[in-house]
Image: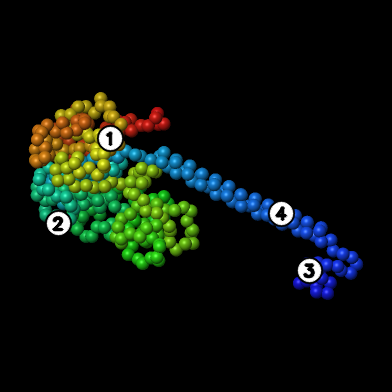
Amino acid sequence: MADRESGVGKRPRGAQVGGKVDWRGWKQERKAETKKWKEIKLLKKLDKQRMRELAEQEAQTQEEQKEDRGRPHTLSVALPGSILNNAQSPALRSYLAGQIARACAIFCVDEIVVFDEHGEDVKSVEGDFEGIGKKGKACVQLARILQYLECPQYLRKSFFPKHEDLQFAGLLNPLDSPHHMRMDEDSEYREGVVLDRPTKPGRGSFVNCGMRKEVQIDKQLNPGLRVTVRLKEPQNPEAKVRKGTVVSSQHPRAVSGLYWGYSVRLASCLSAVFSECPFKEGYDLSIGTSERGSSVDQVTLPSFRHALVVFGGLEGLESGVDVDPNLEVTDPSVLFDFYLNTCPSQGSRTIRTEEALLISLSALRPHIEEAVKTPKDS
């Protein structure tokens, strides 16, 4: 506290005992201190701005690097659901579907098309399983099991109620794909389900992403919707919820190069596999597999954006061509860009579809990698 009697600590008021106050010197000193203080403040502001610009540049560089790692091409496979009718029991039907799912996950297949070669004309997995005969809705059951296995374990109760088609699905080998996260596993992306919880105005919905904390996204979405969430970094460890943004299900593949599971589509016939393609530009590379095709060893595939590999059932692709009302051809080879024998000199009279899937994707893998190479990879 200032001493009122002596005036210590108070601004000079003019003449005092013993002489005059040097007002000019005092003002110049004050100006110099103010100028110095402003310069220090400006330097701090410039440092903050420089740090912010560096952080933005680093974030942009990381984003560009992620885009460089992205995978723009997709791989689809199509096969008839009737292959389940070759199994002798419901348990073996489920196991066969599990083999298909595992093979597709191992070779990073992005889309599985289950087509009907017996004229069942099914386009939805809604309905009940009616036995294991030829009219047992094999396409529906195969599609349902494939969807169940692709879904992360922590989301299955939200999307798959108890169903007879899934009676043995819980015993099947897990896909263990990159999007099948453990609770405490760190990842930039996660699959989640939108929760039915009230939120404040202007705030996004809450999502269960299989973590200890829920995630609040940047949009208001309908409850029960499956979404792909990109988690924001860094996160406040003391926050009650985590923050994230909703992205396309193709985003992890296209931007970060991650395999993010497969989608499942039902086609009423072989021609619908092509005509109902989900990509605007369609499949720019189609491959049919048959023992009557050319050897895969000599093939050179062109560059492509969306590739499709089609497999036949017990009677080959000819069976699907014969029952398709939209096709007037009898030779299935004319439907494809390449008609290949992926296992020349086979020792068995027949190769089962689940075996052909593994053999063909393994044989085609080096040809596909060569076709999608970019100049920077060479």
Q: Earlier in the sequence, mark 2 or mark 4?
A: 4
Q: Position of residue 195 (x, y in %)?
A: 33, 62
Q: Residues within 10 Å of mark 3 (few under 14, many from 20)?
A: few
Query: What residue is rendered at 34% in x and 56% in y?
Result: 192
Disc 2 to disc 4: CB gap under 8 Å: no
Quickly name the residue at label 1: 362
Q: Residues within 10 Å of mark 4 (few under 14, many from 20)?
A: few
Q: Earlier in the sequence, mark 1 or mark 3?
A: 3
The span from disc 4 to disc 1 (Cα, nearest Å) is 73 Å
2 or 4: mark nearer the eye: 4
Give the SS element for disc 1: helix
- In the picture, the quarter occupied by the C terminus is top left
Give the SS element for disc 4: helix
Q: Is 254 or 89 nearer to us in this picture?
A: 254
The span from disc 1 to disc 3 (Cα, nearest Å) is 89 Å
Q: Which mark is residue 10?
A: 3
> Is 344 above or below relative to 69?
above
| Residue 167 in view | yes
Q: Earlier in the sequence, mark 2 or mark 1?
A: 2
Three-letter amino acid code of the residue under disc 1: Ser
Three-letter amino acid code of the residue under disc 3: Lys
Q: Is 175 or 298 nearer to us in this picture?
A: 298
Q: Position of residue 365 (x, y in %)?
A: 30, 34
Colour mapping: rainbow
Quickly name the residue at label 4: 35
Give the SS element for disc 2: loop
Quickly name the residue at label 2: 128
Q: Position of residue 359 (x, y in %)?
A: 24, 35
2 or 3: mark nearer the eye: 3
Three-letter amino acid code of the residue under disc 4: Lys
Q: Earlier in the sequence, mark 2 or mark 3?
A: 3
